[in-house]
Image (cartoon, helix red, strand yellow):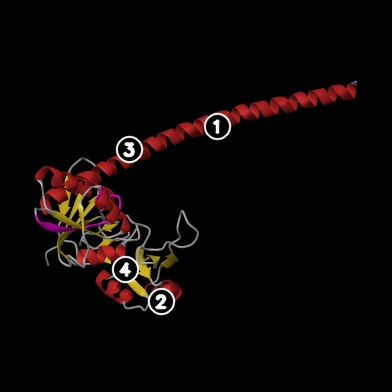
Amino acid sequence: MRQQGRIGRALLAGYLAVTLAGRQLSFGCETLSEKHVFLNRAYGTCVTMAEEAKKRAGIIAVDNHVQNNQVVGVGSGSTIVYAVDRLAERVRQEKLNIVCVPTSFQARQLILQRGLTLSDLDRHPELDVAIDGADEVDSALTLIKGGGGCLTQEKIVAGCAKHFIVIADFRKDSAHLGQQWKKGVPIEVIPMAYVPVTRVIVRRFGGEVALRMAVSKAGPVVTDNSNFILDWKFEKQHNWKEVNTAIKMIPGVVETGLFVNMAERVYFGMEDGSVRTRDPPIH
């Protein structure tokens, strides 16, 4: 009987311990959940603000730089969607004759979905204006692009345009490259060359280089040109014009995400609802 009593008391104590632990765990989860709600709301507010900023920058850029009977280069990424929406709206309302040249498969689909006229550089090798986003913009209007993997075609289209206009939100505005954007400079490479190119970049310029891996597929990211992308996380500031040229001279490199002396104007959508412009410095 005494043994049965001890067993009973032990079972009761275990039950109470598990119950109390469960309540404590529930309370902890409730507290954690409240923190998550707060953080999610703050994050959601920031994301919403950034999206509104992108939209305002895109609208003003299209209104200021697109006219009737033009050939327009259409960039890639999330920001450009708002510019294309505004462009399609103006084409419908003002009966504009606009031809669009895409910088990626995404841009091509966007042009078709919005009912705009699609063309290419074979038929229109000279563009009136190209509008695109950026991952980061420094004080000299040097850009890092290629976070979405479309850097080569984006640079080709921008180089064919009489005017290259960039739209971005306030998070992309930096005094110097690397201040906001921490993922490095994208470099598109021929697949067989990614190891040798990685070694050369680290040896000559320092920092770290990583092969960009895909999220929804096994293996690396493959560009629209069937190439790989390296992300170079640099450790210090460089003469970006010289570095860009030097990296492009490495055998196996297709293009870099450094856009030097290419942007004519950048439109930044700001947190307060305004849109700020930046032009290249006058030397």
Q: Tell me if label 3 and label 2 are in contact, CB under 8 Å.
A: no
Q: Position of residue 144 (x, y in %)?
A: 29, 61
**Image position of 93 (left or right of 1):** left
Q: Earlier in the sequence, mark 2 or mark 1?
A: 1
Work out how far the residue at label 3 is from the one at label 2, CA to CA, in angstroms.
43 Å
SS type, badge 1: helix
Residue that numbered label 4 is attached to: 256
Structural crowding at the residue carrying mark 3, measured as other residues with C-alpha within 10 Å and reported as few (<14), some (14–19) or many (≥20): few
Q: Is residue 252 magenta?
A: no
SS type, badge 4: strand
Residue that numbered label 1 is attached to: 28
Type of amino acid at the residue the image marks with label 4? Thr
Residue that numbered label 2 is attached to: 200
- Given this view, does label 2 or label 1 mark the residue nearer the observer? 2
Q: Quadrant of residue 36?
A: top left
Q: Tell me if label 2 and label 4 are in contact, CB under 8 Å.
A: no
- Given this view, does label 4 or label 3 mark the residue nearer the observer? 4
SS type, badge 2: helix
- Given this view, does label 2 or label 4 mark the residue nearer the observer? 4
Q: Earlier in the sequence, mark 4 or mark 1?
A: 1
Residue that numbered label 3 is attached to: 45
Report the span colored magenta.
69-81
Q: Out of 117 and 24, give the one closest to the viewer.
A: 117
Q: Earlier in the sequence, mark 1 or mark 3?
A: 1
Type of amino acid at the residue the image marks with label 3? Thr
Q: Position of residue 114 (x, y in %)?
A: 24, 47
Work out how far the residue at label 1 is from the one at label 3, CA to CA, in angstroms.
26 Å
Q: Earlier in the sequence, mark 4 or mark 3?
A: 3
Q: Is residue 121 above or below residue 15?
A: below
- Does residue 82 show up? yes
